[in-house]
Amino acid sequence: GQNIDQPTEMTATEGAIVQINCTYQTSGFNGLFWYQQHAGEAPTFLSYNVLDGLEEKGRFSSFLSRSKGYSYLLLKELQMKDSASYLCAVRDSNYQLIWGAGTKLIIKP
Amino acid sequence: IAGITQAPTSQILAAGRRMTLRCTQDMRHNAMYWYRQDLGLGLRLIHYSNTAGTTGKGEVPDGYSVSRANTDDFPLTLASAVPSQTSVYFCASSAGGAYNEQFFGPGTRLTVL
């Protein structure tokens, strides 16, 4: 079967750095996405990785290792507005997205 | 309209009733999707459409139907609602191609009693 694993919840301090991990087992791999979802709102796109390595976009970076079936999202200089759920999704051999359950990130002052 | 709109925002429905959730996008995206999101679970694909006139089944299609008569609209119909269909429903669209970032509508919160 297909499976995406993420921690259910994480807590971090404002101004700090946090790393959210995602491991996956899917039928085929055609890219990995990270989305942010604030409570009661729709998911919004953060990053996309299809090749191994680090993609940096401002305070957010995403890393991929295809051989390990592993990705992480790194958030730097945390702000209170970063409190949200972070969703990892893998595009499989049918070019459909398989979604993890999401990691709820709580930022404390 | 800017992006994707969904209607209604929320709905309480008696079991056995028929219900259509509406989704409209103005980005001229070829592909559209319907997901449901339940607590503790990832988004699950119900149905999708790669282009107007075609539809396909996702992971959890039973009890749902869709149509894609034109590029902009992608309604989701529950023929006879059951309590297990209580969920938040998101419509999404993408331009297609290798990148395929999906854009999401605001969601419809549906409660079936």
Image (cartoon, grey):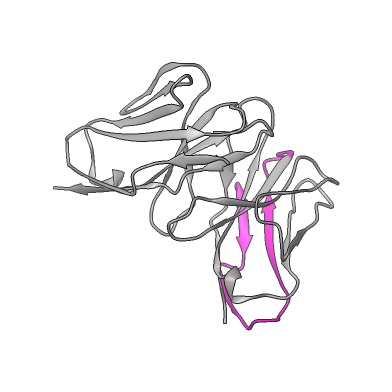
Residue, x 79% and y 40% (percent of image)?
B51
Q: Position of residue A62 (x, y in %)?
A: 39, 26
Looking at the image, residue B96 sits to the left or right of residue A26; the answer is: right
Tell me: residue A71, above or below residue A85. Answer: above
**Farthest left residue?**
A109
Residue, x 65% and y 50% (percent of image)?
B59
Q: Nearer the viewer, residue B98 or B38?
A: B38
Tell me: residue B80, above or below residue B23. Answer: below
For residue A27, which quarter of the picture?
A: top right
Q: Position of residue A21 (x, y in %)?
A: 35, 34
Looking at the image, residue B80 sits to the left or right of residue A53; the answer is: right
Which quadrant of the figure contains the N terminus of chain A? top right
Q: Is residue B15 magenta?
A: yes
Q: Is residue A87 magenta?
A: no
State which region is magenta.
B1-30
Residue, x 80% and y 51% (percent of image)?
B68
Q: Position of residue A109 (x, y in %)?
A: 13, 47
Q: Position of residue B79 (x, y in %)?
A: 76, 72
Residue, x 21% and y 32% (percent of image)?
A17
Picture mark count: 0
For residue B29, which quarter of the picture?
A: top right
Looking at the image, residue B68 sits to the left or right of residue B2; the answer is: right
Q: Nearer the viewer, residue A30 or B101?
A: A30
Tell me: residue B83, above or below residue B56. Answer: below
